[in-house]
């Protein structure tokens, strides 16, 4: 009969191991954690990358630190897992990397950007080097200042320019990625906290306040600007605490609404006047069927990419490969 029973249950669920499994899976989709085509990270890197993401989710790493590590780390893709962020693409040219960063952390698609805007941002990622080792599929990702002299021929200007039009000041020998990361995770950044808050709302509610959540642009405004502004402000005030953001939404009256519409107006769904019925994630559905039937995934492969077999007691949501 406790009036706080719902809040207490939410807190318990956020501490369960399945919380880390499930949300690592969701972030794994965003970060493109996949062994084979079209990403081709390969198994060892996938395992390291997924383990790092899952640990960050479990330990509730602040989101700004999570993103900073993804953007600025150097080292072996087997041992410094965040560097796989720069390998989870089909092309490693600066423009592609800039577009990936904009899509992932700014919720923005660069296809419609003016060319100079994209090349200005691409300059931050024009000095990333890649070199193989003697280990199968291992690769070192590192800051390569020697690339500076060729940045203009790589399609990126010598002076990096932030997406808001501000020219960056980068000291000699400084990694431009560090400068970009500091700009990106600043509380005053117009994209960073807004994109994360909108994405979490989309995951929990089935529709973004800005819909789609990776298509933030001036002519696609939020359906409820005050709501998104409030979530953004609370997220920054919590020092980018994702669990605090989950709690805020899960404890809300809006999240608890019935899925039975009270009106036939089509605007009701866009304004979250009722719960939106969502299909289960494929992995969740498979796990539910296996739990009901007592079965498991009968997968075997002669080629261990990504798995030779899936252990029968491993849930699909816990798999490290997309």
Image (tube, rainbow, N blue to C red):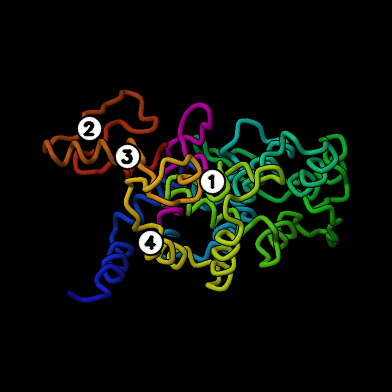
**Residue matched to label 4:** 250
Report if residue 52 lies within the magenta region: yes
Residue 287, quarter of the rendered image: top left
- Of labels 1 and 4, earlier in sequence is 1
- Work out how far the residue at label 3 is from the one at label 2, CA to CA, in angstroms: 18 Å
Disc 1, SS: loop
Q: Position of residue 174 (x, y in %)?
A: 78, 59
Tell me the quadrant of the picture where the C terminus can be found. Answer: top left
Is residue 213 visible to the viewer in this orientation of the structure? yes
- Of labels 3 and 2, earlier in sequence is 3
Please say if 196 is above or below 247.
Answer: above
Residue closer to the observer: 234 or 154 = 234
**Residue matched to label 3:** 280
**Residue matched to label 2:** 297
- Of labels 4 and 3, earlier in sequence is 4
Other residues around mark 3 within 10 Å, as few (<14) / some (14–19) / many (≥20): few
**Residue matched to label 1:** 77
- Work out how far the residue at label 2 is from the one at label 1, CA to CA, in angstroms: 29 Å
Disc 3, SS: loop
Q: Position of residue 29 (x, y in %)?
A: 47, 41
Q: Position of residue 19 (x, y in %)?
A: 33, 56
Q: Nearer the viewer, mark 3 or mark 2?
A: 3
Please say if 167 is above or below 285.
Answer: below
Residue closer to the observer: 187 or 68 = 187
Q: Are marks 4 and 3 in contact (CB under 8 Å)?
A: no
Q: Position of residue 196 (x, y in %)?
A: 55, 55
Question: What is the magenta range?
Answer: 30-54
């Amino acid at each position: 009969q406790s009036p706080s029973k719902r809040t207490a249950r939410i807190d318990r669920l956020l501490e369960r191991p399945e919380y880390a499994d499930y949300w690592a899976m969701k972030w794994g989709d965003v970060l493109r954690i996949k062994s084979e085509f079209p990403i081709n990270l390969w198994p060892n890197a996938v395992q390291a990358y997924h383990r790092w993401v899952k640990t960050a989710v479990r330990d509730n790493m602040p989101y700004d630190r999570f993103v900073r590590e993804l953007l600025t780390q150097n080292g072996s893709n087997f041992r410094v897992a965040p560097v796989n962020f720069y390998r989870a693409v089909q092309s490693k040219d600066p423009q592609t990397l800039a577009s990936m960063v904009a899509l992932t952390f700014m919720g923005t698609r660069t296809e419609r950007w003016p060319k100079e805007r994209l090349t200005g941002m691409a300059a931050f990622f024009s000095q990333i080097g890649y070199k193989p080792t003697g280990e199968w599929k291992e690769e070192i990702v590192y800051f390569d200042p020697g690339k500076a002299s060729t940045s203009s021929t790589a399609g990126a200007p010598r002076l990096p320019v932030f997406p808001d039009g501000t020219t960056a000041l980068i000291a000699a020998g400084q990694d431009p990625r560090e400068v970009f990361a500091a700009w990106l995770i600043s509380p005053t950044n117009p994209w960073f906290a807004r994109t994360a808050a909108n994405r979490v709302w989309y995951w929990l509610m089935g529709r973004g306040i800005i819909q789609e959540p990776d298509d933030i642009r001036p002519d696609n405004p939020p359906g409820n600007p005050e709501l998104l502004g409030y979530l953004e402000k609370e997220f920054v005030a919590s020092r980018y605490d994702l669990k605090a953001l989950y709690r805020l939404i899960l404890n809300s009256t809006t999240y608890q609404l019935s899925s039975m519409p009270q009106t036939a107006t089509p605007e009701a769904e866009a304004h979250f006047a009722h719960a939106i019925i969502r299909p289960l994630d494929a992995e969740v559905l498979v796990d539910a069927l296996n739990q009901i039937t007592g079965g498991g995934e009968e997968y075997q492969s002669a080629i261990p990419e990504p798995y030779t077999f899936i252990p029968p007691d491993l849930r699909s949501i816990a798999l490290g490969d997309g």
